[in-house]
Image (cartoon, helix red, strand yellow):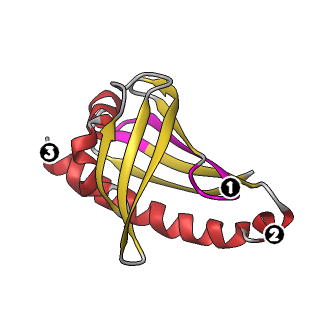
Amino acid sequence: MRTAQCSLDIHRTPEDLHAFMLDLRNAPQWGELIHRMEWIDGGPHAGARIRLHFWLEGREQVQEATLAEWEPGRRHVTINDSEPGYHCAFSYDLAPISTGTRVTISSHVTGRTLAHRLLLPMFRKRHRLRFTRALERLKAAAEQAR
């Protein structure tokens, strides 16, 4: 089930923007809560694993995700099963427009139990807010890096 989705137009070509997004050294500039990301086994390529370091409720959290899909300059999908009780897929779609690229971030979250499924509306609200902020930060960082 799609939990949340947000889009924003950014003045960079899809290829340049996607390269910026997948250069994980840039992640703290735009990724909500992220303070470091690194490729575990090389990347980007489908199947590559990513280690995410982020702050949540005042504590550093470390999780791993998998780059499940990767179409350079067009799309990538990460799968994160580190969240107890949930399966989370995050898709990043890039579409060319006359002024650059329209980026759409979507989350697809499923709860593994009834209790977890009942909490999905909370995920929807939280993801929409985080995606909006992340896209605004991505726009600022990517356009400045030109």
Q: Which residue is mark 2?
A: 115
Which residue does the numbered mark 1 point to in the structure image? 86
Do the residues bearing badges 3 and 2 touch, measured as CB atoms within 8 Å? no
SS class of the residue under badge 3?
Answer: loop
Residue 68: image location, x then y, percent: 55, 30
The quadrant in which residue 103 appears is top left
- 51 to the left or right of 4: left
The kind of residue on which mark 3 rests is Ala
**Residue farthest to the bottom?**
58
* Residue at 60% over, 52% down: 107
Point 75% across, 51% down: residue? 1
Categorize mark 1 by other alpha carbons within 10 Å: few (<14), some (14-19), many (20+): some
Residue 127 appears anywhere in the view: yes
What whole-number distance in Å separates the C-alpha atoms at marks 1 and 2?
Answer: 11 Å
Task: Classify residue 115 as left or right of residue 83.
Answer: right
Q: Which residues are magenta?
A: 82-102
Among the 4 quarters of the image, the one containing residue 44 = top left
Residue 60 percent coordinates (x, y): 35, 66
